[in-house]
Amino acid sequence: MNNLNFFSDYLIATLRLSIPLGFAALGGLYSERSGVLNIALEGMLLTGAFTSAAATFYTSNPWLGILAALLAGALVGLLHAILCITLRIDQLVSGLAINLVAAGLTSFLGRLVFSGSSTQQLPGIPAIIIPGLANIPVLGSLLFQQDILVYLLIFLVITTTYILYQTSFGLTLRAVGESPKAADTSGISVENVRYIAVIISGCLASLGGAYLTLVQVRFFAEGMSAGKGFIAIAALIFGRWHPIYSALACMLFGATEALQLRIQALGANIPYQFLVMLPYAIALLALVGLAGKSTPPKALGNPYK
């Protein structure tokens, strides 16, 4: 029974650690499928985390916190779109700039909002317990006792897969990312499609940040995204820009992070620094193993005139 409980707890931890990565990777998928490189996922996660925490702190309503995160994410996505699509600034530079600004601005505003105590406990989003199904061993606690954001992510992964491969919008999005000139010739507004995709990207990534503050830890801390945006990019590449494969890659990285936390809790005689870097090392090894095998959208990173 102890082994079963340990396994069940490990799976739950894996799922919860995968959710922010999943939202960020799904957001990055929309942007990069349209041809806009989105290195700004880290900054979008951090922005969503801060705005959801601040709005919840002032209103004591986590649902308003989620709404604030969506609006803030949309604005950051719009900024990235203006810089990359309209002004044609290098997409890598734009993303890195947004990351740096988000890190500094959320740190500064966090100290103002929370009066120097960023560990202010916030009202969280309660889990939805499905009667009957929640009592199933292992699967019950894993799948039927989760909060609304977990179910939303699962729904969005399935819906995005359908949209991407079964609808005219998905075909348009992929066409713009693969051959914007051909799409433009057929009457598609490349700029409009890319704007929509990058704004959606910001909204989804910010939901990952909201999950961090309203479900996972229930307070805001400086730099709490801790590189998750970059791991989400690795998961996106590892998943070959496919919604389901990218979600599974996020689960892999979430499982790695859960493993290093479990090893630390067991008190193994291993320097904790090596354990902390384990998820990033796995992400790096995954990318090295995919060198030359994962083909990005052909127009990714190239501005279109």
Image (spheres, rainbow, N blue to C red):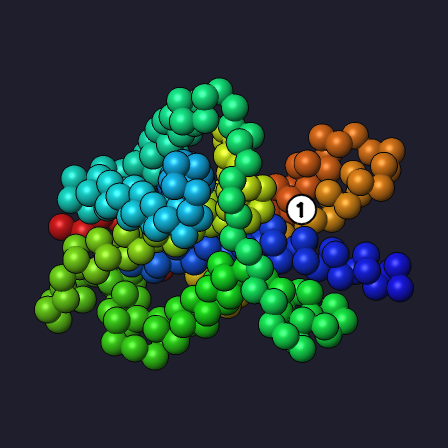
Disc 1 target residue: 257
Residue at point 81%, 60% (across, down): 5
Picture quadrant where residue 100 is located: top left
Query: How many C-alpha atoms fall within 10 Å of the one at disc 1: few (<14), some, or many (≥20)?
Result: many
Left or right of 136, for residue 90: left
Q: Can residue 162 be seen in the rendering of this structure?
A: yes
Q: Secondary structure at mark 1?
A: helix
- Give 84 or 104, whichever is nearer the viewer: 104
Q: Position of residue 248 (x, y in %)?
A: 57, 63
- Position above or below: 134 against 274: below
Residue at point 73%, 37% (across, down): 275
Image quarter (top left, top right, bottom left or bottom right) of the N terminus = bottom right
Q: Residue furthest front?
A: 60
Residue at point 34%, 45% (across, down): 68
Q: Position of residue 50 (x, y in %)?
A: 42, 36
- Position above or below: 274 against 149: above
- Give 181 or 29, whichever is nearer the viewer: 29
Residue at point 34%, 38% (across, down): 95
Q: Can residue 247 be seen in the rendering of this structure?
A: no
- Position above or below: 77 against 181: above
Count of marks placed on residues: 1
Left or right of 288, for residue 36: left
Left or right of 69, for residue 131: right
Q: Amino acid at mark 1?
A: Glu
Q: Position of residue 87 (x, y in %)?
A: 16, 39
Picture quadrant where residue 47 is located: top left
- Position above or below: 138 against 42: below
Q: Position of residue 137 (x, y in %)?
A: 76, 71
- Give 22 or 274, whichever is nearer the viewer: 22
